[in-house]
Image (spheres, rainbow, N blue to C red):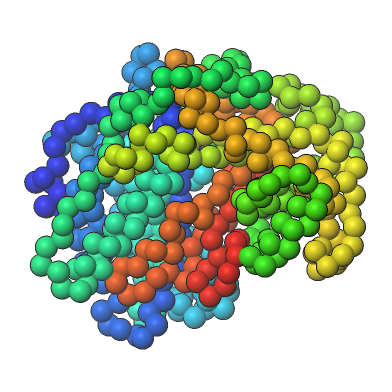
Amino acid sequence: MESFLKIVKSETYALNGWDFISGFANIPFTYYYKNTDASPDFMPADRLRAAFFRTLQEFPILAGRLVVNSQSRAFVVVDRDNLNLPEYIESESPIHYSFAECAQFNPGALPISACIVGPSPTASADGQLKLLNVHIIRLRDNSGLVLFANMPHYVCDGFGYSAFMRRWAEVCALMHNGAESVPFCNYAFDRAILDRAMPEQMQPLDNACRRVYSTRRVLGRFLSWLSPEARGRLLVEGCKRMPVSAHIFHISKQRVAELRCRIADESPLRRISDNDVLTAMISQAVGAAACAASENMGFVESALRLARRPFLARDEFMSLVIVDIRPRLKQLEQTTPYVGGCITGIPVFSSLRRMSQAGFAGDKYGDKDGNKLDASVLADACAGVRQMVDGLTDSFVSGIDYAINRDPTCYAHSLALALTTPEKIIITNQTRFGLYDCDFGCGAPQWVCPPPTFLTNFASILPASPNSDGYK
């Protein structure tokens, strides 16, 4: 830590609309590491901590404070004389790694929770909103280690999160191998880099995106009035009152390929990616479940549900697909890795009536009971996702950039839409983050996952663990 305190400089980083559009959420992951050869030098605490603060030298923004001024403009202020150091907790557990492994890494198998934050950023015990939270649990007999790390979306997105985690692991591995010095890596935090990467040509938003980014709402005005800490506390308390059931499903690449072929028979699409298939399948399954649930509601419950969704037509289901704009901005790819916010949600609206009419048909592509969503409906859903992806050009991204940055409270109105729309699913693909690339010198993690209870109506497409293929 001393070396970090000596090198860190005071600096202020201005944030932008891309940082706040998803700022209501955290980025939390839990990593399970196994001491496969019972080494006494397995991920020692002092080396982990030394590598952590060495990596922090390259990510000084994570030691800053989030500040919002009277004009709703946000900044991260790094004051070397008054740092907001990351939360770094170390614990021990009487549970052996083999027990966690036999329990299929069920978080409930641990007597203490690895996750030390909620789904939304809130103030920690010292009253400060931390920009990085770490909890390391060493398992019995040094048989393994559970590492939890979280960053709020205010300061980075999944790309930035994974960049820090991979770099921390890389620095620790170098120390493990006896490196006398660690070369310095550069990362870009200046949001002006993103401004310069935006093309001058700007495409107007379509109707769907205007509903998300350009419609002002009373709830949005209230949410923007709150401080980030108060807003996070409100969202966390709200999540506690809405029970969340978390599930993990696995699908092999062979099964995805079979589904893709099946969909191709029903669709004129020339290109169908795995992401198209998975996103369409998740949306269709959740939409069909929403239709089934609504049919069993009483009059009062139905009325209350309709009152929560005044911004969508009664027949609409919203899939908010999270996209990374980096591949759309050629100038950004040519710079030092930019780790600020670069994601947003693009809505894909579907007909609930169409979902309810899809029905089920039994064949080999179905679930264990032989049930399967109709391929023609999946083809329609795939077409909607593919149209959205193909339409996300650099000029369209520039249009979104204009919408979310001309009004610094835009993020709050988009959040209000998400909160008041029960028939929805938010889908993010995190397979490109390199979650299993975080080898601290003693082997890659055996399992990586988000917390069991995160956000309602939220789905993550994750890479499968090293001993299996496909997605989870």
Residue 306 or residue 406, whichever sits in front? 406
Is 348 placed left or right of 183 in the picture?
A: right
Residue 284 placed where, x, y %?
76, 46
Residue 79 placed where, x, y %?
18, 33
- Image quarter of residue 192: top left
- Image quarter of residue 342: top left
Is 55 placed left or right of 226 in the picture?
A: left
Say if 253 sits above or below 326 in the image: below
Which residue shows up at 26% across the image and 68% down it? 173
Q: Is residue 339 visible?
A: yes
- Image quarter of residue 438: bottom left
Residue 351 placed where, x, y %?
81, 34
Which residue shows up at 66% across the image and 36% down it? 387
Which residue shows up at 69% across the image and 31% down it? 421
Q: Is residue 229 visible?
A: no
Is 469 placed left or right of 86 in the picture?
A: right
Say if 413 sits above or below 81 in the image: above
Residue 350 placed where, x, y %?
76, 35
Residue 359 or residue 383, whichever sits in front? 383
Say if 436 sits above or below 397 in the image: below
Q: Residue furthest bottom?
A: 37
Quarter of the image where the C terminus is located:
bottom right
